[in-house]
């Protein structure tokens, strides 16, 4: 068994926007290197920008010293819906969720009641951001916040906090 492996995102002819530890199109040449027996958490976010459909995402794991030696492949079938379809699905019920979590750039909420605003607090209890009158399917910018843990207060139109969610803001580059 090889001692080190690296994680590489395979790109199509027209590369999408990719944030990873290895992206030669953007000059990021820092692959995730694991010694024998080590592991790591792999996070990826797909930002379809109002494109719907299905696609296959494939991640190939290779020996860092012999890139032609494929150690394994992880394949994911992805179905993308637009914001209107997502809002319709949310009406079917379920608990409130924030995704993607951890977030790199923008996050979304599903299954929310009618809200007056969303407040973001840091771990010191300071309000760092507020979004007024959020609508189903809206995205919320968090990419400029420092990495860390945040609390989202979902506030109804009467000013009452109806739910608090945890959000992790994280960069995926070394």
Image (cartoon, grey):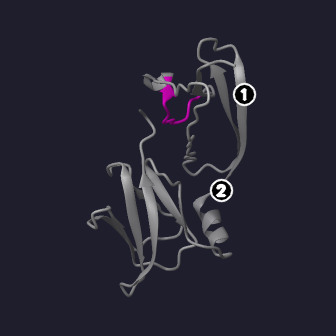
User: At 71% from the left edge and 35% from the top edge, which residue is drawn?
Assistant: 74
- Mark 2 vs 1, N-terminal side: 1
User: At 61% from the left edge and 30% from the top edge, which residue is drawn?
Assistant: 37
55 to 50, vertically: above or below: above
Residue sitting at the far bottom: 158
Residue 46 appears left or right of 19: right
* Helix, strand or loop for disc 2: loop
Location of residue 7 in the rendering, given as x and y in whole percent from the top left corner: 58, 28
* Helix, strand or loop for disc 1: strand
Q: Residues within 10 Å of mark 1 (few under 14, many from 20)?
A: few
102 to 41, vertically: above or below: below
Q: Residues within 10 Å of mark 2 (few under 14, many from 20)?
A: some
Nearest-to-viewer mark from 2 and 1: 1
Chain part drawn in magenta: 14-23
User: At 66% from the left edge and 76% from the top edge, which residue is drawn?
Assistant: 93
On-image quarter of the C terminus = top left
Pointer 2 with pointer 1, Cβ within 8 A:
no
Kindly identify which numbered label has been placed on residue 72: 1
125 to 71, vertically: above or below: below
In front here: 149 or 48? Answer: 149
Location of residue 135 in the rendering, given as x and y in whole percent from the top left corner: 48, 71
Location of residue 164 in the rendering, given as x and y in whole percent from the top left corner: 44, 73
Residue 157 appears left or right of 108: left
On-image quarter of the N terminus = top right
Residue 103 appears left or right of 47: left
Please tell me whether the stretch drawn in magenta is mainly helix, strand or loop.
loop
| Circle 2 residue | 81
Location of residue 109 in the rendering, given as x and y in whole percent from the top left corner: 52, 65
In front here: 125 or 58? Answer: 125
Residue 93 appears left or right of 112: right
Q: Quadrant of residue 161?
A: bottom left
Spatial distance from mark 2 to mark 1, Cα to Cα? 29 Å
């Amino acid at each position: 068994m090889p001692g080190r492996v690296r994680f590489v995102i395979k790109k199509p002819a027209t590369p999408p926007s990719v944030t990873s530890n290895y992206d030669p199109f953007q000059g990021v040449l820092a692959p995730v290197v694991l010694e024998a027996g080590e592991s790591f958490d792999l996070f990826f976010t797909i930002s379809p920008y109002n494109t719907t459909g299905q696609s296959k995402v494939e991640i190939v794991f290779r020996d860092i010293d012999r890139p032609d030696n494929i150690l394994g492949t992880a394949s994911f079938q992805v179905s993308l819906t637009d914001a209107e379809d997502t809002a319709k699905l949310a009406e079917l019920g379920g608990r409130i969720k924030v995704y993607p979590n951890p977030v790199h750039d923008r996050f979304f909420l599903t299954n929310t009641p009618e809200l007056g605003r969303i407040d973001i607090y840091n771990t010191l209890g300071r309000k760092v951001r507020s979004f007024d009158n959020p609508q189903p399917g809206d995205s919320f910018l968090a990419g400029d916040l420092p990495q860390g843990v945040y609390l989202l207060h979902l506030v109804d139109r009467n000013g009452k906090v109806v739910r608090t969610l945890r959000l992790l803001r994280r960069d995926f580059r070394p």
